[in-house]
Image (spheres, rainbow, N blue to C red):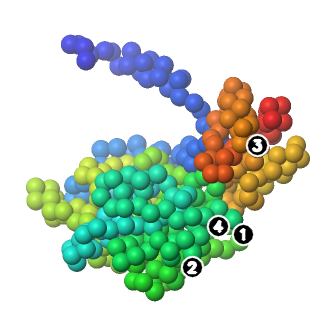
Amino acid sequence: MEERGMEIEAVKKLLQDKKRKDVAYEKILTSMCTYPHEIAAYAHEMFLEANLGDSGLFQGAKEMEEEAVQMIGKLLGNENAFGYISTGGTESNIQAIHAIRNRKRRDGLKAMNIIVPETAHFSFDKIGDLLSIEVRKAALDDELRVDVNSVEELIDDKTICVVGIAGTTEFGQIDPIEELASIAKGRDIFLHVDAAFGGFVIPFLEQKYAFDFSVEGVSSISIDPHKMGMSTIPAGCILFRDETYLSELAVLTPYLTTREQCSLIGTRSGASVAATYAVLKYFGREGLKKIVSECMELTRTLVQGAKAIGVSPVIEPVMNVVTLSFPAAEVDRVASALEERGWRVSITRKPKALRLVIMPHVKEETVKAFLDDLEDVR
């Protein structure tokens, strides 16, 4: 830091220079985030100073959080669910396992494990490290969903949670949540559903899937408004069916305006809460369904175009996530060639394939331009 500060215009120029180094979303086909809607940006800026870590000072922001949680809970089959707006799926997943870990530890259980699919988000590896819990990874079935037989084989008397994914990061698949719920109920095990991406997609698909609190046995759900919910970053949400799990997370905050906190972090942005509240109010179910429908239409356009040039999907997409199949030795070359043309794509782990996410910033002309380049480099 220099002794004397810079003029504000000079700082603005520095920011503009840095901004030019960021990749614009227009040719990004890897990210599950997108441009926030203008009403989200407006709300975010209005509540920049709001700190929900000391929510007694920011009653308006707190009321928006409570209503946003209720709206998201209703979307996920239980408007009476309990939770808070988090920083995203990683925090939400941590807190779900944190809650059941604390309860089981209080009951006297020492060594513990959780069962997750091989396709689980890397946040569960962080969870194993942070909470000192063994993370066991269940195999997948032919549709790249978790194999329930593998889950059952991994469960023992130290298993405190089974995790199902509703919208896997790599393949966009939906695990058989009803079957997992049956297993969890039969063994009195906590069931967490990671719907960080799929939570704002699956309810609006033409085909219906049982994945949320409408399934008896689902204990908690994570969902990210800053993905398909069009909110600002960071905005996730963790919801519990049973309010007492929030008590397992509570710590006393004697010098603040509230008695305790249940969140992982202390200072929490009221701005992203306001953004989430604003977009949910603005779009409603009809608006969110329209966003999903447009993304799914472009997903079908991409798959049909890829097939027309001889490139098949690994699986037919369930959601707006496409994986294209190439010989394993060719995937890296194709990805590199596309990157040279300005595209940002990613590669799945197993099976190895080209991965594309069709977010709201992707337009029909984007898909057509991508297909032209894909045909050239394949």
Q: Say whether residue 315 is left or right of residue 248.
A: right
Label 2: state its secondary structure.
helix
Labels 1 and 3: the sequence-earlier one: 1
Which is nearer the eye, 43 or 151?
151
- As measured in the structure, the alpha-carbon distance from the residue carrying label 2 to the one carrying label 3 is 34 Å
Label 3: state its secondary structure.
loop
Labels 1 and 2: the sequence-earlier one: 2
Relative image position of residue 295 (x, y in whole percent): 69, 53
Question: Residue 179: which numbered mark, if any?
Answer: 2
Look at discs 1 and 4 and give the one toward the viewer.
4
Look at label 1 and name its amino acid: Glu
**Cβ–Cβ under 8 Å for marks 4 and 3:** no
Look at label 4 and name its amino acid: Asp
Q: Give me the residue at 15% from left, 62% from top.
A: 252
Q: Say whether residue 104 is left or right of residue 92.
A: left
Can you identify the residue that label 1 sits on? Answer: 206
Look at discs 1 and 3 and give the one toward the viewer.
3
- As measured in the structure, the alpha-carbon distance from the residue carrying label 1 to the one carrying label 2 is 21 Å
Can you identify the residue that label 4 sits on? Answer: 141
Residue 359 visible? The answer is: no
